Structures are given as structure tokens and as C-alpha cells.
Image: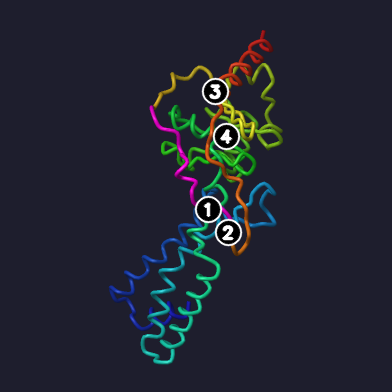
Amino acid sequence: LAGLIAFIFRSKLSPEMLASLAFLVPFPFYIAAMFGGQAIMFAPGAASPAVNDVWFNDRYGAGVVLPVALYAAALVMRWPWGKIGLLALILAQSFLIAQGGIVTLQDGQVGLSCNPYSVIPDYLRRHYDTGYILDDTYNTATDFRAVPEITLSNVIYQGSGAKWQQALRDPASIVNWIIVASGDQVSQAIDVHSEAFNAQYEVVAIDYHSGAVLYHKRGLPPLPTRLITIDPDANAYRLCGTIPLFNVPTTSTVPHAPAGRQAAVVRDIKHVHRAYAR
């Protein structure tokens, strides 16, 4: 901050000063995204106990690296002793990284990045077309990043404000897809066993790890079918393990989908729903 102030007073309205402000763009962007419910920050005391992603916030730390480097250099450029102090800080930081590891690398070794293979994201990769998806993301931990066709704006979750409340009250008015898991807020608000609900939605996929169920709204155009390979494969999990500094274990496994199990479970659930409707 001191370097920013010094740089502004020193450079006035020069092209260099104005160009340097581009590196500050992530800050108002993240603030606006959080205010609009399109980004979140991990707070251990506020998040669900099911959330254990210690490196989730490293994205915000990464955003400060460039402006810190730029304005810290601008602050000490005319102060000889400042250069020595800055060099000492860089050496200390290098020592800390050597001891604890690179957090942006470790972020990909734990948490959502190393979740086991899930049927629901795989189904969506193959068949998702359009429409909102209702999901209690804190409990299902659905990895939408595996689905290129889905952006965060397509997902209605606890951070979606009025849309979240509307989807829980009257899902058919706003969402085409619903993910339900035992004990989550969606299952508590919506009776998925009711005749009215099953007249509007049908089961299309069941995750055999978590037991989560994916529903799709009836009466919509036929879903597309994309021919893709299973993702992620064994190679994608080779770096998943334990963070030495914090000893954070992962439960990740190489995906092994039981042959025919998902299809059998889906057929059984549909049979029960049809019998209940009759």
C-alpha cells in the first residue's frame, strides 16, 4: 500500500501509473463477485463441517502477488537500504516455501481437486444442454469444473440469494436439474418422493460414492449425447496425497465405476417412482 501511494505521487497521471492500475483489477472484481453471490471465501468457522478445503483462498493471495511485486519495487527503487531489505524478504520467503511447499501447487493435491470419480459430473459432461442446476454444493461437493458446458452462473446454490430461495420453494419454476443428497438443504426443503415432484422430475443418474441423485425436468427436448472419455483417469490422480506441513489427508481414489451398477440403481429408482405414481 505504501508503494502504491508513493508510485501515484511520484508518477502523477503518467501512462506508466495508469497502466499499473490494471494489476489492481482483481480486487474490485472479487469484491463484486462476492457481493453478487458468484464467488465465495472459505471461513473455517462459518463453512459447513463437510467443507475441508484448506487452500481454497489461495486464489485471493495469488491476486496480490503482481501488485505487491510492482509497488514494492517502486517503493525501494530510490532507497538503497530498501533494496537490501527487499532481498532479505525474498530470501526468507524462499526458505518458507522450501519448508512448506507451494500452496498453489498443493491446492491441486487436496480437496475438490482430488475428489473421487463421480457419476453425476460425468453424466452432465455427456448430456447437459441448458438450464439452472439446483445443488447444495457444501454437502454434495459436485465438481462442476469437470463439465466445460457449465459455468458458475448455471448453478443455484446457497450463495445465489433470491434464486436459491425460489428454487427451494418452487423448483419447477426455475431449475431444469436438481442434485439431492441425504441430509442436504435441498432434500430438507423438497419432498422428492411426492407424487407432484415425480410428475415434474425424473431420476437420470445416481452417484454410488455419495448416494447423491441427479433429477432432470420432464417434458423438455431430448438431451444431447456427447461421446467422451471417462474423466478424470488414473493419471489425473497421481499427485494426490498428503500436504506435509498440515498433514491433510485425501480420500481420493482412482475412479473405478462398478460395471452396470449405476444403470441398475437408476432402473430400480425409476421403477419405485412409477409404482408410487400408480
The residue under label 3 is which amino acid type? Answer: Val
The span from disc 1 to disc 3 (Cα, nearest Å) is 31 Å
The span from disc 4 to disc 2 (Cα, nearest Å) is 33 Å
Mark toward the start of the polypeptide (1 vs 4): 1
The number of discs equals 4
Magenta region, main secondary structure:
loop
Q: Residue furthest left?
A: 15
What residue is rendered at 62% in x and 62% in y? 246
Residue for badge 4: 134
The residue under label 1 is which amino acid type? Answer: Gln
Is residue 236 one of those drawn in magenta?
yes
The span from disc 3 to disc 2 (Cα, nearest Å) is 37 Å
Q: How is the image coloured?
A: rainbow
Q: Which numbered disc, 3 or 2, marks the residue closer to the eye?
A: 2
- x then y, percent, for residue 186: 66, 34
- x then y, percent, for residue 182: 69, 33
The residue under label 2 is which amino acid type? Answer: Ile
Q: Residues within 10 Å of mark 4 (few under 14, many from 20)?
A: many
Residue for badge 2: 243
Residue for badge 1: 109
Label 3 element class: strand
Q: Which numbered disc, 1 or 3, marks the residue closer to the eye?
A: 1
Q: What stretch is highlighted in magenta?
A: 227-243
| Residue 268 vertical placement versus 239 (above, below) | above
In front: 268, or 6?
268
What residue is rendered at 57% in x and 50% in y? 111
Residue for badge 3: 204
